[in-house]
Amino acid sequence: MIYGFLSVAEGWSTGAMIIRMVSALIVGTIIGVDRALKRRGAGVKTHTLVCLGAALVMMTGQYIKMNFEGNMDIARMGAQVISGVGFLGVGTIIVTGKNQIRGLTTAAGLWACACLGLAIGIGFVKGAFITLILVMFTLKVLTKLDTKLHMYAKVFDLYIEFPNNQSVSEFMERLHKMEVKIYNFELSKSKIKGEGPNAIICIEVNSRGKRRNVLESIRGMVCVKYMEVL
């Protein structure tokens, strides 16, 4: 039954068009649900519309190729979709006040969703669903792996709030005594009146095992009001 379904999708008929567009709807919805559950900027509707639009563009290119005379490049319209979705993805990428970059995965997901739509639109439904499985594996399983790697990295960023200006120099002296390498240190004035400065600092520890001890030591410092691992 599945092979018959795929065979129809590879052809050119009303049934093939319906199968392709419904497949695009399913693919876009599945990827969009994952993003929506994580409260990302682009959710179910955005991913579904991108996938449906990409599928329609590819089908339109095939329709023009089959029904109009001339040397029509069927891939030309699809190429414009891939580049155009890049601009849409940029809109989901933001830099927070703590210099954290958010939205890269969502932007990549939108681009992948468009590519899946193009594959479905031309009738390559089998390849699209195989890729969908791998995309969901990346979003579900590799996200956990990425988090684990981030937790045990020797180089990491910290966001720190100090009670006053004098605490900054005391903090730096304590870090040097702990033999922690400092790669970057950005000190900013607090936007809240009466509050001390805050800083984003990139540091490196000698070993992964030492990371936990360093973080606990920083949290226990009197000169540190608040600390967060970025």
Image: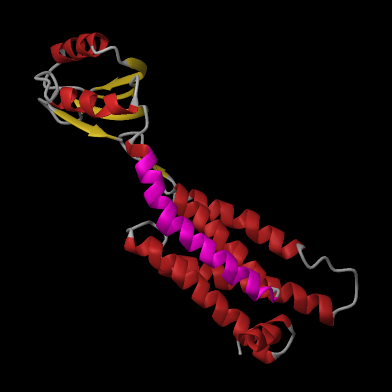
Residue at 48 percent of width and 56 percent of height: 138
Up-down relation of residue 9 to residue 61 (above or below):
below
Q: Taking 130 as reference, is 78 left or right?
A: right
> Total number of numbered labels?
0
In the rendering, at what x and y percent does residue 86 appear? 57, 52
**Is residue 32 highlighted in magenta?**
no
How is the structure coloured here?
secondary structure
Asked if residue 63 lies left or right of residue 227, the reply is right
Residue 97 placement: quadrant = top left
Magenta span main SS: helix
Residue 17: x and y in percent read: 65, 84
Q: Residue at x 44, y 57 (%)?
A: 139
Res. 140 visible in picture: yes
Left or right: 172 in relation to 222: right
Depth check: 97 or 111 in front?
111
Residue at the spot 42% in from the left edge and 56% down from the top edge: 141
- Which of the two residues, 212 or 94, is positioned nearer the viewer here? 212
Q: Position of residue 119 (x, y in %)?
A: 66, 69
- Above or below 63: residue 111: above
Camera-nearest residue between 103 and 27: 27
The magenta segment is 123-149
Vertical order, 168 against 41 (above or below): above
If the image is split into quadrants, where does the C terminus sit?
top left
Q: Is residue 102 in view from this perspective?
A: no
Q: Quadrant of the N terminus?
A: bottom right
Q: Is residue 20 above or below residue 87?
A: below
Direction right: furthest residue:
70
Residue 168 lies in quadrant: top left
